[in-house]
Image (spheres, rainbow, N blue to C red):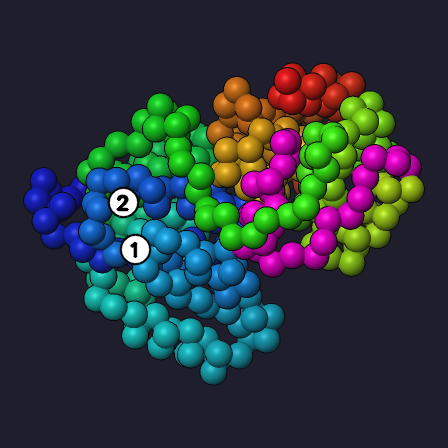
Amino acid sequence: MYNNTMKKEINHIAIVRLSALGDIVNASVVLQYIKQFYPNIKIDWITEEVFAPLLDKHPLINDVITLNLKKFKKDKSLTLLQEQIQKLKETPEYDLVIDMQGLIKSSLVAKFAGEKRHGFDKHSTRESLAAFFYTSTSHIAYEENVIKRNCFVVSDPLEFEISSDMLLTKQRVFPFTKTFTLSKEKKNIALVIGASWESKIYPIELLADVCNGLKEQFYIIWGSEAEKKMAHKLSSLTPFTQLAPKMTLDELVSYISSMDLVIGNDTGPTHMAWAQNIPSITLFGPTNTRMIYETTQNIGIKSPSKVDILKINKNDFSIKEIPPQIVIEKAKELLR
């Protein structure tokens, strides 16, 4: 914990959140609150190179510093590792580096990036060794809502509070950079069909039932060839869908921001709806609603299975037990 003169001392900070897409989306909400309490502060963001398009046009971010640690992990190249470390050593002299990820790799990134480093304490993260590399820490239960965790690990060392009311009245997290031509006769609903694990994916056949039950205009978000095949299969089962165009991350944010509703799995594009103040339904199987900040317009529907957040069961396919009729009913409520 820092002393009460911090606001006079903190002029330039770095946030470390390397991955993944949904986590970066959820973490980015803190930017508006930091700027609210420190209007003149410079905020840099250190992330994996692949996620830079989401952040590099953000008006509240001073600079995006990209790393390619995934390539290092794949190639096991010491030369590449040395290049990444050198890039971090060449960053500005930050007043504080805040690690929002809480992993050993992210804590090491923070260590190379600055002398004063803040993160979760050893009881607040799955990789407790990460806390060894910080010069100060915050305690918040790992089981707590991820949005609240993100907010606390940033606001605690900067000595301000992000209340529930502030989260409920937040501004849109990302800028709107592109417009799209959508249906004017029906409600426009985005379907997020993919996810990082197979067990997090709601079955295509059940999504078709949702589409046929609502009879609105659905746009299928896809990001890989495998997801594109899933999208074509879904389109063959219902006349109410069309494939969304292939998009960059910043274009995807604008696309999601144009929708009346987003329905999807526990994954990045679905989380974008909450970030952009768009109504959403997130479907959960092996994970739970801890991963989102529920509001009157952003809700989660959980399968019957119990979740141990400290030991996620990736073989839990209970998401298929969520009845399409429940999704339809919730969607109708949100579209009123």
Residue ID for mark 1: 43
Magenta stretch bounds: 237-262
Visible residue check, residue 328: yes
Q: Quadrant of residue 262?
A: top right
Horizontal relation, residue 43 to residue 103: left or right: left
The location of residue 250, given as percent across then percent down, is: 54, 54
The location of residue 291, given as percent across then percent down, is: 53, 34
Q: Is residue 260 magenta?
A: yes
**What amino acid is labelled 1 in the image?**
Ile
**What amino acid is labelled 2 in the image?**
Lys
Horizontal relation, residue 135 to residue 241: left or right: left
Residue 222, placed above or below residue 284: below
Q: Is residue 320 magenta?
A: no
Residue 35 circle label: 2
- Between the C-alphas of marks 2 and 1, the distance is 9 Å
Visible residue check, residue 193: no
Which residue sits at x=64%, y=31%?
261
